Image (spheres, coloured by chain):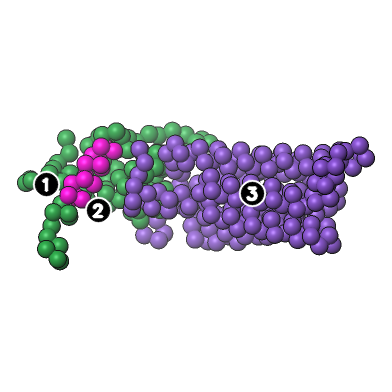
Amino acid sequence: MPRRSEGDFAIDRVIHEPARLMITAHLYVVDSADYVFLMRNTGLTWGNLSSHLSKLEEAGYVEITKDFVERKPHTMAHLTDAGRKAFDAYRRQMKALFEDLPGEGS
Amino acid sequence: MRPRSALRDLERKIWLRTFEHGLWDVALGSLFLSFGLSIFVDFAPLTAIWVVVLFPSLRDAGRRLIIPRIGHVQFQEPRQRANTRLIGILSVSVVVGLMAFLFTAWASDGTAPTWALWIRGHFAGVLGMMWGAMIAATGWLVDFPRLYAYGALMVVALWTTDLTGRIHLGVSLTGVGAIILCVGLVLLVRFLRTYPKQDPREGPPHA
């Protein structure tokens, strides 16, 4: 199970980490993407990307599939239903958190 | 599930990036160039050569040049349908072009009705409106804004041909094709310079 922070706002720390948040956001808006695409779009190195994807995979948020395209290995990542739900929940929590903070006029 | 707000912007940014390489422009430009040249030199098989040789080569170039540089992404269902639409409309453009040739042959045999003779008299203008509308509609359907400009260019070029009556239809169509092709080639060169081939085991060059 993914680790969550203590307190009223149970923020999902698996998603909350900036690099993983970027990866999850990119995978949320598309169906699936390969490593090169994610590296290009997130600016992460191969090692970093690989390690963060492994954590997301361990949490059950991302599924990695490996196949061959024109005899070359091709690795695609896509967000699982659990990952999609977790990301939606994270968005709602963050929105609620910032909406509840006192603003300049309050 | 449709992404919203900032996420929708992110998705659209990713989508538009898939047109950055200019290969679609090269495909469209070369298609109209082949139409124009086939009218100009009166050799219809030129378009067939485009369909049989050039289009598959461009698809292959896409796999070899584009994917190793920006990676492979599979969009969600609505966008996937858009790509199919783009290929479909390119195919329809080819069919419409070939039918236009057949129409002019039929309308010039002397037995054609008045409306057919009118269309034949304004053939360039009608073709320009038809293709211009088709290109702009494609731009709207697949969310590819450059196509609006190409549609307008087609209408202006072919209506100018029709109204002045001094420019050969083949020349103006070749010109439109050449302009779109040049835009595509410039974008392609810029893309190849901006995104060198990426080995997944190395970090991104711009990281």
Which residue occupies the extreme front position in the image?
A: B114
> Is residue B185 at all visible to an observer of this figure?
no
Say which residue appears at 37% left-offset and 49% top-offset.
Answer: B8
The secondary structure making up most of the magenta span is: helix
Amino acid carrying mark 3 in the image? Ala
How many residues crowd mark 2 within 10 Å: few (<14), some (14–19), many (20+)? few
Marks 1 & 3 on one chain: no
x and y, in percent, of residue B151 in the image: 63, 54
Q: Nearer the viewer, residue B179 or A5?
A: B179
Q: Would residue B2 appear left or right of B147 to someone viewing this image? A: left
Say which residue appears at 17% left-offset and 49% top-offset.
Answer: A96
Which residue occupies the extreme left position in the image?
A: A7
- The residues tagged by marks 3 and 2 sit, at their Cα atoms, a distance apart of 45 Å
Marks 2 & 1 on one chain: yes
- The residues tagged by marks 1 and 3 sit, at their Cα atoms, a distance apart of 53 Å
The chain shown in green is which? A
Identify the residue position indicated by label 2 in the image.
A18
Identify the residue position indicated by label 3 in the image.
B133
**Range drawn in magenta:** A83-96
Asked if marks 2 and 1 touch (Cβ < 8 Å), the reply is no
Q: Which of A62 and B118 is in front in this view?
A: B118
x and y, in percent, of residue B100 in the image: 78, 42
Number of dots carrying numbers: 3
Q: Mark 1 lies on which chain?
A: A
Say which residue appears at 77% left-offset and 39% top-offset.
Answer: B99
Identify the residue position indicated by label 1 in the image.
A9
> Under tag 3, what secondary structure?
helix
The chain shown in purple is which? B
> Under tag 2, what secondary structure?
helix
Q: The N terminus of chain A appears in which quarter of the rendering? A: top left
> Under tag 1, what secondary structure?
loop
Amino acid carrying mark 2 in the image? Pro
